[in-house]
Amino acid sequence: MPLFLCLMAGSAAADSWQLRPGDTPFAQAELEALPGQTFRFFDGGESQYGGGGAYAYTYSAENGGGTAWGSYRIAGDGSVCVDFINGFSRCDLYVRNSGRVILITRQGERFPVR
């Protein structure tokens, strides 16, 4: 992703994500409240946000189990970017829609949170 996209702010940046009607990206206050939160997904996986930018994703037993460790940061477009210790990186956007929290990937995949 070009660097300038990470530095954009506001709704113009959200336009680069594949949003659907009703999607409302997390506000800055919600992003700042990530430390200490765990998001559980319907496939059994869990994203855990720790203090100081610590991050862990634990896979469900059906998906092999195990935990991927890394660190996260909030990008200028409101997405949450994770750098894993294995060298893999990704950015995702959390939105609310009809009372549900949904993680959207850059590819447009949608993963509702339980």
Image (spheres, rainbow, N blue to C red):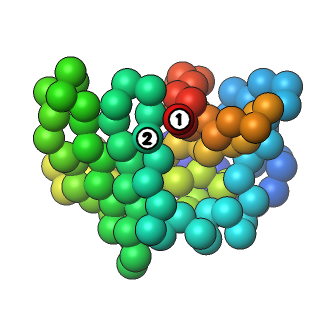
Q: In this view, does 11 lie to the left or right of 85?
A: right
Q: Which residue is drawn at 19% across and 46% down?
A: 67
Q: In this view, does 75 lie to the left or right of 48?
A: right
Asked whether the viewer can see residue 93, the reply is: yes
x, y percentage for residue 65?
A: 16, 34
Residue on which disc 2 sits: 40
Amino acid carrying label 2: it is Arg
Q: In this view, does 50 lie to the left or right of 97?
A: left
Q: Residue at x 83, y 49 (%)?
A: 11
| Residue nearest the viewer, comparing 46 with 12 | 46
Q: Few, some or many C-alpha atoms within 10 Å of disc 1 (few <14, some 14-19, many ≥20)?
A: few
x, y percentage for residue 28?
A: 72, 66
Residue 31 position by quadrant:
bottom right
**Are the two marked residues, 1 and 2, in contact with CB atoms closer than 8 angstroms?**
yes
Q: Residue at x 34, y 31 (%)?
A: 44
Q: Is residue 96 left or right of residue 91?
A: right
Residue farthest to the bottom? 52
Amino acid carrying label 1: it is Arg
Q: Which residue is drawn at 54% across and 23% down?
A: 109
x, y percentage for residue 55?
A: 34, 60
The local secondary structure at tag 2 comes to: strand
Residue on which disc 1 sits: 114
Asked whether the viewer can see residue 76, the reply is: no
Which comes before the other along the chain, label 1 or label 2? Answer: 2
| Residue nearest the viewer, comparing 36 with 18 | 36
x, y percentage for residue 74?
A: 55, 63
